[in-house]
Amino acid sequence: MFESIKKKFAEASGKLTNKVSKEAEEENNLKIEGKIQEEQNELNSTVKKDINKETSMDKSEITSIGLKNSEEIENSSNDSNIEKDNDIKENKESTFSKIGEKLKFRKSQDEDFINEIHDDEVDDKSLNKDKISQNGDISSINEKISEEKELEDKKLEDKKLDDKESKDTEKKSGIFSFIREKTISEKDLDDILWELELSLLESDVAIDVANFVVESVKKDLIGQKIKRSNDVEEYTYQALRNAVSKIIDIEGKSMTDMLEEKNKKGEPLVVMFVGINGTGKTTSIAKLANYYIKKGYTPVVAASDTFRAGAIEQISYHTDKLGVKIVKHEKGSDPAAVAYDAVEHAKAKGKELVLIDTAGRMQTNTNLMDEMKKIQRVSKPDLVVFVGDALTGNDAVEQATKFNDAIDIDGVILTKADADSKGGASLSIGYVIGKPIMFLGMGQTYDDIKEYDPDWMLDQIFS
């Protein structure tokens, strides 16, 4: 059962997951690309400024140091050769120490260069060579800065490639994590929930129920923060389950609980069954008699369907097989009198359960509906149960509504629930009339009846 509804829910969940994931992916791609470009521009600008600043300062300082040293060397040309050598050495050491300090050369490089100066002969030629060497060092410095800039650019390119490869890997693995959260909006839901509503109606779900499901899901999902694509499917599943749980879990009387309470008081529980022809009332009564016999109770059946030919024989067949007492009158007799006699028999014999069969009638047949009300007044049932055929879908919901308006039913038994692939009636009937489903007919034998459990129903829909 519920194959159709399960399929509709799965399709809606899949479409919503794909749509939200795709939109989140597009939004995040734009965000990532914009951020990378901004960082690239900012880094390029910073590097350019630093290069210009350092190059300008270095050239200026080298020039001023070089001029100053030239003047000192020229002024000391008349001194002795030893003093001249010492002055040149000291000036050279000072010049390249300052250059090395400014450009953050390693100390070992300065010392190696100064040692070379000690070994050279100091004359006019060597001075010219030293000046040329200074110019060469400036070129070397500029080349180093250019290399560093190229290295930074390469790192940025590598980072972009790594990010892209990582993102592609995540996509292929099916575990797509969003860079920033995606918030589900009403626009994300509208078209998909509209399709879901139509598909539920196609599965015989009542329009009020379909509307409720859609609005409940919308309320639960709008504003949800999604971090991964898997979150969409999970949130949608929970929203659908939450909506359905509210629909199928209707508070009401339990036949078994009421039977136990009446038994403690020493009184029989009187149950009257109503519905249209062919829904399975008589068979359901036989199944319930068998169900409660196995729980240790003793039922009695009232054959109050005196209107239809063969009805008395049909119910008698079942009671004979089960060994249950039946109270019956001749065909055409007063059905209310039959019901009254059955209740009095149960009280006299100490039997705990009275099951009253009534004639099937269309909800539009006024005379028969009035007769049903008379049976209710005379027998004073503790429970009035509507028996509907799950395969009739929305018709079963409409019938239950009419009977509820006429005599205020207390609950529902749905027959042939196991054969209903759509499941619309099972999902809708309790919510529409505001009364619980009590039992589900699940097959042809006397044992094929199940006391209703909302949690079991949820598991059937969302398994």
Image: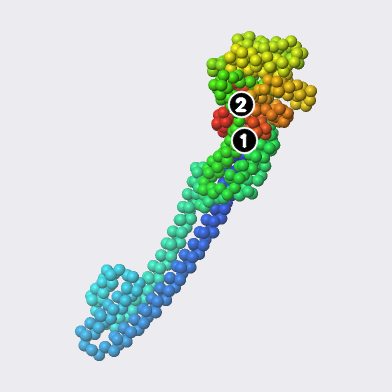
Q: Amino acid at mark 2?
A: Met
Q: Residue at x 60, y 32 (%)?
A: 251
Residue at mark 1? 247
Q: Quadrant of the N terminus?
A: top right
Q: Residue at x 61, y 33 (%)?
A: 250
Depicted 350 relative to depicted 404: above or below: above
Q: Quadrant of the C terminus?
A: top right
Q: Answer with left or right where residue 116 lies relative to residue 34.
A: left
Q: Answer with left or right where residue 390 lies relative to residue 77.
A: right
Q: CA distance from mark 1 to mark 2?
A: 15 Å
Q: Position of residue 86 (x, y in %)?
A: 23, 82
Q: Secondary structure at mark 2?
A: strand
Q: Position of residue 405 (x, y in %)?
A: 72, 31
Residue 64, labelled with which disc? Answer: none
Residue at mark 2? 438
In the rendered image, which quarter is residue 247 located in?
Answer: top right
Q: Position of residue 65 (x, y in %)?
A: 34, 81
Q: Secondary structure at mark 1?
A: helix
In the rendered image, which quarter is residue 321 located in?
Answer: top right
Nearer-the-camera pick, 268 or 171: 268
Q: Is residue 2 visible?
A: no
In the rendered image, which quarter is residue 207 located in?
Answer: top right
Q: Amino acid at mark 1?
A: Ile
For marks 1 and 2 on the same chain, the one whose residue lies earlier in the sequence: 1
Q: Answer with left or right where residue 46 lies relative to residue 408.
A: left
Q: Give the crowd class for mark 1: few <14, some 14-19, many >=20 residues within 10 Å.
A: many
